[in-house]
Amino acid sequence: MEWIDDIEEKYIETNGIKLHTIIIGKGEPLILLHGFPDFWYGWKELVPLIKDKFQLIIPDMRGYNLSDKPEGIENYRIELLIEDIIGIIDQLHFGSVYLAGHDWGGVLSWFIAEKYPNKIRKLGIINAPHLKIFQERVKYDEAQKKASSYIYNFLKPNGERVLIADNFKLLRAGFKDQDQETEDKYVKAWSNGTIKCGVNYYRANLDYEDWSGIINVPTLVIHGMKDNSILPGVLEGLEEYVKNLKIIRPKTLGHSPMKEDPQLISNIFLKFFI
C-alpha cells in the first residue's frame, strides 16, 4: 500500500472532542464515514482508486480507534455525532462537501444530510438503512427482526463483553479473507475501549425519532443484496424520503461492498460524485 505514505494525520478539535482524521488526495472534498466495528482503515481498499479525484477526509468517528472516547451512552446520541462531522467541515474551511458512509457511518450520513443540506453537495450510502424505514422494518418484518436479533444483545448491560471475549474472537471471525497485518491493525484499534463506544451508538440511537427523514440532496444508495444483517427490504419506501435518489443493488455483494469489490464501488462513486 504505497499510498499509505501519502496520508496526512490530524487530530481535529470538533464539538468538544478530538477526532483522529486521515486526509489524502487531491480534488473536491469527500468525507468517508466508517461503520461498526471499523475505523478509518475500513476504506483502505477504496482509497487508492479514488484519491487522485478527491481530497479524502476519513475520520475515526467518536469513540473509535485514536479518537476521543467520552464516557456514557448519552455522549453517543445522534445529535452529537452530527455536530462532530459538521465541525470537521468547518475546521477544514469547506463550505460544502461530498459525503459517503457505510453501516453506522451511513446511518449518520442520512442525518447529516437531513439537518445540513447546505453543507452536503451529494450523499452516498453503502449498506446503511434510513432509520425511519429501519425502525418500521424491525417492528413488522419478521425477516429483518430476526436478522437484527444480534442488536438486542448489544443493548443489554455489558453487552459488548461477548465481542471483546477471547481477544475479540467473534469479531476476528469476520477477517478470514484478510491478511494478518489487517487483522492486527483492527485488534489494536479495538483494544482501547472502542467496542464499548461502538455499541453505545446502538444503545443511544435506535429509538431516535426527532427528525423528518427528508433528504433534499442528490443521493446514491449502494446496497449489497447478500447483506444478512440489513436486508433489501430497507430500500422499500426510500423514494418517499429522498427526492433525488439512485439505488444500485449489486447482487453478489454483501454488507461491505467497498471491501468486497472496491473497483466497482470506485467506478460508481466517480460517476456519481464527479
Image: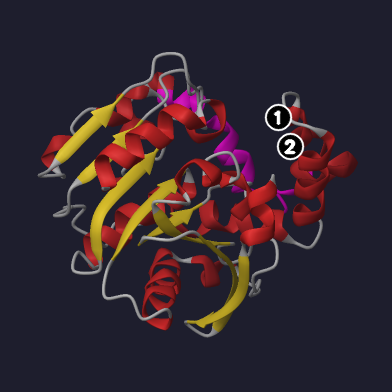
* Residue 135 visible from this viewpoint: no
Q: What span is colored magenta in the figure?
A: 144-161
On-image quarter of the N terminus: top right
Instruction: Indicate left or right for 241 with 206 as reference.
Output: left
Label 1 sits on a secondary structure element that is helix
Position above or below: 171 against 206 = above
Position of residue 8 relative to residue 184, above or below, is below
Labels 2 & 1 near each other (Cβ < 8 A): yes
Looking at the image, residue 114 lies above or below residue 35 = below
Q: Residue at x 57, y 81 (%)?
A: 17
Q: Pointer 2: residues within 10 angstroms few (<14), some, or many (20+)?
A: some
* Residue that mark 2 sits on: 171
In the figure, is residue 214 to the left or right of 168?
Answer: left
Counting from the top left corner in percent of width and height, residue 116 is at 24, 68
**Which quadrant of the structure image shows residue 96?**
bottom left
* Closer to us: 44 or 72: 44
Q: What's the residue type where badge 2 is placed? A: Leu
